[in-house]
Structure formats: C-alpha cells, structure tokens
Image (spheres, rainbow, N blue to C red):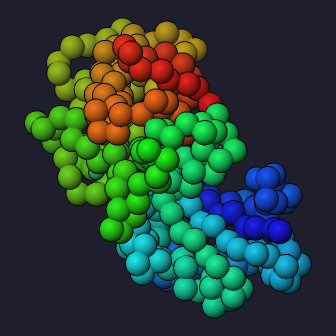
Amino acid sequence: MVYVGVDVGATYIRVGLVNEDGQVINKVKTRQPTSGDENTVANVIIKSIRDLTGWGGGIDGIGIGSIGPLDLREGIVPWAPNAPIKRFKLVEPIIKEFRVPVVLGNDAMAAVWGGEYLFGIGKGISNLVYITLSTGIGAGVIVDGHLLVGKDGNAHEIGHVVIDVNSEIQCGCGGYGHWEALGSGGANIPRVIKEFIRGGRSYGSRLYERLVKGEYVSTEEVFQAYYEGGDELARDFIDNYLMKVHAAGLASVMNAYDPELIVLGGVQWPLITWIYLEGGELKNT
Ligand SMILES: [Zn+2]
C-alpha cells in the first residue's frame, strides 16, 4: 500500500509518498504560491503527486495536514491568517483528480496522530499533546486515545487562547492578546518586541538601537542576538517576557487537556530546551 502525505504550511507545501510503516519513499517541497484563486493550492498538490508517482496512479489514499483554521465539512481552509492565499479548497479537487479517499486535518492534528502517536515518541500514550511553535502556534490533541476534532476541526486551536486581556496586539484571527500573537514567529515577535521597548527602559544593545531607529528586526535576528551576542534587550525580552507567554500557554494546555506528555515542535529553536513546567514533562523533538 502506498499513501500520499501532504503538509500545507504557511510557507511551503510538502508532499510525500509513504508506505504503511510511515516510511517516506519520496518527497517534494514547493513554495506556497503568492497569489491565485481557491484552486491554486490544490493544483500545486496535484502536480506534486503527479511528479512523484509519474502519473498519479497506484496510490491508496491521501492524508492532508494543513494550516488552519479549517472547515472540515467543506474540506477547505476558509481564512488562513498566515498564508498568502487566504481561502482555498483542499479535498474536493484532489478527490476529483485521483478518485481515492482524501482525509483532511489540521497540520498539528496530523503531527500528533501520525508523527507522534502512531510512529513517534508518543507511541501508545493515550493523553498526548503536540504543539508547534512556528509562524503560528498550533496543537494536536489526543485525549483518552481519541483525536480531538470539533465541529469544524478546530477543537485544539490553542494558539488563540487569551494570554493577556489588556494586550493591544492583534492576532491574525482578529482577536487580541492571543498566545500566537504574543509568542509566535513570522510577523508576530517583530511586532511584540517593538511594543516591549515602549515601556521606557533603554538598553545597551544593538538590537535596541536598531529598533529605536525604526528598523525592522526579524524573529530570527532576535534569537540570534540572544544566543550569539548575549544582547541585553534580547535577553530581557526572551527571559522575562516570551518565556512567560509560553509558560502561560503551556499551563492552559495542561489545564485544558490533562496530558501525560507534551511534545514541542516547530522552529522556535533552542528556546524549547529550557521551557519547563513544574510537574509536567516536556520533551524536545
Ligand atoms: Zn488568534
């Protein structure tokens, strides 16, 4: 049996052929198209599957993990805050093309189920949460061996819990003070660190000088300044602000889902090696 696994991210669309044991036979990565209509993303996936299989035959099913939020009944992403094309179809055009079962889930749902519960570090652990700290913050949740889904597939959109009710920082979803808005990469940390220095304190820091001049400082640069240069502002921001944001988010996860294990993934780098919660077990993937 040969299956296709698709990962629709904010920046890349990855398509892989996998066998029953979850081993990747072949894969291809394409940049998210920057413009197009609601079929453009599906067309990229269809082309990738054709490229991988030669002609698109011989596959037994297709599983898609996508950035959300999702509308599972329609099989679409109705409004993706972090992707260039905001609204796109996933299920219908791909079923039409290949005539095999297509299963859609949020990317973090796919990660917790396939990546951790069936084949990964969470094998056999029936209360398990996978969190991605990336361009956005998402989670996949298994409670008592059941994958949480919800009416539209958003039962675990934990990136949108409110961390700060007084925050004026708006999330991509429209709300304010959400974990994702305050703590995720992409455009969020650059905005948050600008707000952070408004408190009035000044720093002997190159990062601070650049921000005061109105320069754009990326998420990567904030972390680089922290790890390479020991920058005073980067240290204060990450140690005394960002860590609290993540700790508050993780505490909400623990209170909401009562997991035995939380697996952290995504690209918020070495940061994840030193978050810890008392009484909770965190593992770095
Ligand atoms: Zn939000």
Q: Is 253 placed above or below 160 here?
A: above
Number of marks in picture = 0
> Seen in the image, is 43 located left or right of residue 220?
right
Residue 80 picture quarter: bottom left
Most extreme residue toward the bottom, as rendered?
A: 96
Give me the residue at 82% from left, 60% from top: 19
Across and down, in percent, residue 63 comes to 63, 67
Q: Nearer the viewer, residue 116 or 216?
A: 116
Give the image location of residue 216, x and y in percent: 41, 38
Residue 56 vs residue 164, the one in the foreground: 56
Q: Is residue 39 left or right of residue 181?
A: right
Vertical placement of 10 versus 206: above or below?
A: below
Residue depicted at x 62% and y 60%: 7
Is residue 98 placed above or below 20 in the rendered structure?
below
The spot of residue 151 in percent (x, y) is 33, 68
Please name the residue shown 36% across and 21% down the image: 243
67 vs 12, left or right, is left
What's the residue at 60%, 66% (across, down)? 64
Can residue 191 be seen in the rendering of this structure? no
For residue 24, say whether it is visible: yes
Q: Quadrant of the C terminus?
A: top right
Question: Which quadrant: the N terminus?
Answer: bottom right
Check the image and name the residue furthest to the left. Answer: 166
